[in-house]
């Protein structure tokens, strides 16, 4: 698939009610994909395109919402071919403390830290291949609200920041209604452990399942003990090995854990009205962790059925995919350099962010597709000119294969452009080094086309 083809598909439904703006949005995405670390202006292929970016941002018809909606629709199209899709959602900070002229920012941890809070939902296959982002929610805090956390506790859920979890779940429920043949699962961390989210699952027919890590030691219906003490002695229980990913300076390791699971009913908090919520708990505890290492301990709550050991293992695998959104945030900030955005006008920044989110997704998608289907044809992700240029550059030859190589082989060549050093056969390139390769690829592809007298000038009529 050529670059212009996937961009055409991604923004197929974009509609600014002006064909020139629709085409310009695709040109902007193309230029930004070819230079993900640049600004929208800096990534422009020439001065005319740079002026086009300014006119696009300033036009009253262009909004970030339309870009998000087009990507959302393309993501839904992708997920329909899967039987199960995870909707992983989380919040990250966009810190613009050093940009005093940026409009719309609010405080973060302190009054001196200024920026936005971003809460997207990343759609993933259970094999961790990202399908796109939906429900991109960005907001800022008012300085007048600083230090009033205790007062906010009495507010209705709709007026709290925690409402973002409800909003994301309702977005997933809307997608579920459009995709009856795909089971959607909302996956989130301990911050989302609020009663209202569980209650939401009881109000919708064919509602998406919820899977989250528990934070509160909740009371259980028909039980004297609370959640943690109850699950300490719950049966069935069985041992299993789990790979704990690298964290900071701690290397990846294999942990011996005990897994318990049980059907439970969560009581409504004493301060809230509501019925008890039937669900399932899966409790993972590490046995004999290494000295100086905090033992692995997850208390997972889900509305997805867990009546067998294989169900519990599936839930653990699904929750482990939650880490992918952290990688996605890292791509957005490190490879796409969203925090280097110098746009002052709030609406303009939101447009920039919308494009950068699509580019970050595509880099991540290429990374995980290469891992999931390494033997597939590289033309699933690369045009003939792109993979041939990589081949000739990597092997320092003018001869190319008669048939396309595998995705894995070409992705490794792309990674080597970005500085990838393969220390072992099983070591796979990550998204950050691939992003560097993607930034160099257009130049060597252009030179390849010049030297072989092929026409390769991807563009959209503006």
Image: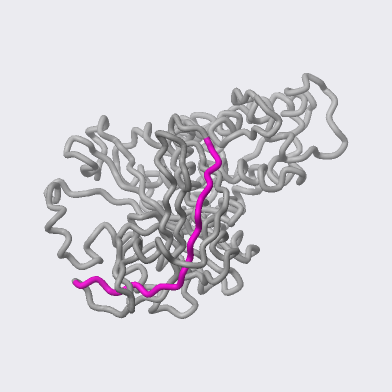
Residue 178, percent from left and from top: 54, 72
Residue 74 higher or lower than 437, as above or below: below
For the residue pair 287 and 161, the one nearer the viewer reads as: 287
Residue 97, percent from left and from top: 25, 33
The residue most toward the right is 402
- Is 450 magenta? The answer is no
- Is 257 magenta? The answer is yes
Residue 327 higher or lower than 429, as above or below: below
Q: Which residues are magenta?
A: 252-270
For the residue pair 286 and 101, the one nearer the viewer reads as: 286
- The answer to whether residue 177 shows anywhere in this view is yes
- The answer to whether residue 355 shows anywhere in this view is no
Question: In the rendered picture of this protein, how many numbered marks are placed on residues?
Answer: 0
Q: Is residue 448 left or right of residue 80?
A: right
- Mainly helix, strand or loop, the magenta region? strand
Residue 62, percent from left and from top: 41, 52
């Amino acid at each position: 698939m050529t670059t212009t083809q996937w961009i055409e598909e991604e923004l197929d439904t974009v509609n600014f009610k002006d064909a020139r703006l629709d085409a310009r949005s695709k040109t902007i995405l193309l230029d930004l994909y070819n230079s993900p670390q640049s600004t929208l202006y800096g990534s422009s292929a020439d001065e005319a395109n740079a002026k086009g970016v300014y006119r696009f941002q300033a036009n009253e018809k262009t909004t970030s919402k339309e870009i998000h909606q087009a990507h959302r629709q393309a993501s839904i199209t992708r997920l329909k071919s899967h039987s199960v899709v995870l909707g992983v959602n989380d919040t990250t900070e966009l810190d613009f403390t050093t940009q005093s002229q940026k409009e719309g920012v609010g405080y973060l941890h302190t009054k001196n830290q200024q920026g936005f809070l971003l809460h997207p939902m990343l759609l993933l296959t259970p094999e961790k291949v990202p399908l796109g982002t939906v429900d991109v929610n960005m907001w800022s805090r008012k300085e007048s609200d600083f230090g009033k956390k205790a007062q906010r506790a009495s507010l209705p859920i709709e007026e709290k920041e925690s409402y973002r979890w409800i909003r994301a779940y309702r977005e997933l429920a809307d997608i579920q209604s459009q995709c009856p043949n795909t089971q959607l699962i909302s996956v989130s961390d301990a911050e989302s452990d609020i009663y209202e989210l569980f209650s939401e699952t009881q109000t919708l027919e064919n509602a998406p399942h919820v899977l989250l890590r528990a934070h509160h030691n909740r009371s259980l219906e028909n039980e004297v003990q609370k959640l943690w003490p109850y699950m300490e002695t719950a049966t069935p229980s069985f041992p299993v090995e789990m790979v704990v990913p690298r964290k900071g300076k701690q290397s990846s390791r294999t942990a011996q854990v005990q897994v318990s699971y049980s059907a439970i009913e969560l009581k409504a908090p004493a301060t809230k009205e509501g019925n008890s919520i039937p669900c399932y708990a899966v409790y993972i505890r590490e046995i004999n962790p290494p000295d100086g290492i905090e033992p692995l301990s997850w208390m997972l709550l889900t509305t997805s059925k867990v009546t067998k050991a294989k169900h519990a293992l599936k839930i653990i695998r699904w929750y482990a995919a939650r880490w992918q959104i952290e990688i996605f945030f890292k791509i957005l900030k490190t490879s796409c350099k969203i925090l280097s955005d110098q746009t002052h006008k709030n609406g303009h920044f939101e447009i920039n962010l919308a494009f950068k989110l699509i580019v970050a997704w595509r880099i991540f998608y290429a990374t995980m597709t290469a891992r999931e289907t390494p033997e597939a044809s590289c033309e699933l992700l690369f045009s003939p000119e792109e993979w041939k240029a990589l081949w000739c550059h990597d092997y320092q030859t003018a001869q190319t294969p008669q048939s396309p190589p595998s995705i894995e082989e070409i992705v490794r060549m792309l990674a080597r452009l970005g500085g990838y050093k393969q220390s072992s056969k099983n070591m796979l390139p990550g998204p950050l080094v691939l992003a560097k390769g993607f930034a160099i690829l257009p130049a060597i592809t252009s030179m390849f086309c010049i030297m072989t007298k092929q026409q390769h000038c991807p563009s959209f009529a503006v």
